[in-house]
Image (cartoon, rainbow, N blue to C red):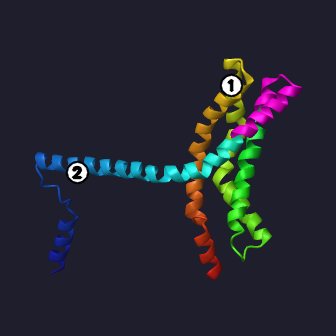
Amino acid sequence: MKIKIKQLHLNLQIPKFAHLSNTEMGAYSMGDVVLESSKRHNSVNGLAVELPEWTKRYLPQEILGTATAIVGAFIAQLFTSNPIVISYAGTAGENVGFYGLAVIREIHLLRRSENSSIWKIAWRTFRNLVMEFGPAEFIDSSLVRPGFMLAAQSGTGSVLGGIMIGKLAADIVFYAIAVNGYELRKKLFGQITTKSLAEEKNN
């Protein structure tokens, strides 16, 4: 009896397609292709859902950041013609506008929770924004954005044109990292909404 049970167990381990013909194996291969195509389709659909959310989140900050980047570069140009200094001034100016609005929006949402103390709001704001922007900002401000702005100024011969072109090029790198930080933040801490804050207050 033990021998029969063991034999049955071994038979179950044999892949179900071991006896198939080449034609039938080809059908399985086509099935794999269809499955992979379906995965790509789902990925595209996921991007279509997330893109409006990302746009709504980042566009206002991007508009304000662009304006303050120009202001920062313009002020630096009043004191020096050094393109390196101007590039870093443009980067700093953009950070003031971009993150200033990010902090204000975050605090405004968190303050809608009645049980949130000022320290809890401050901690959550810091935690959330560092998770979302920390890696992207470190890479961006230390090298990528000033480097692109400097290269664009040298290539165009224009401070304003160089700042704008360099900024747009750096944005591609920045958001490629930042959106992943945002999605990770949502997975770890949940989506920050009025509903989620109310649910946490009741628990």
Local crowd at mark 2 within 10 Å, few (<14), some, or many (≥20)? few
Disc 1 residue crowd, few under 14, some 14–19, many 20+, Cα 10 Å? some
Residue 175 can be seen, yes or no:
yes
Q: Amino acid at mark 1?
A: Gly
Residue highlighted by disc 1? 161
Q: Is residue 115 left or right of residue 20?
A: right
What residue is shown at x 59% (from left), y 77% (from top)? 199
**Relative to 200, 158 lies left or right:** right
Circle 1 SS class? helix
Circle 2: element type:
helix
Where residue 43 appears, as percent x and y from the top left, is 40, 50
Would residue 89 be visible to someone looking at this image? no
Residue at 67% x, 64% y: name it: 109
The answer to if 79 sits in the magenta stretch is yes
Q: Position of residue 152 (x, y in %)?
A: 67, 24
Above or below, comparing residue 155 to residue 166 in the picture: above
Mark found first going from the N terminus, 1 or 2: 2
Disc 1/disc 2 C-alpha distance (Å) = 52 Å
Q: Is residue 182 left or right of residue 24?
A: right
Q: Amino acid at mark 2?
A: Gly
Where the C terminus falls, by quadrant? bottom right
Residue 109: which numbered mark, if any?
Answer: none
Residue assigned mark 2: 31
Overall secondary structure of the magenta section: helix
Q: Which residues are magenta?
A: 66-87
Q: Is residue 171 above or below residue 36?
A: above
Mark count: 2
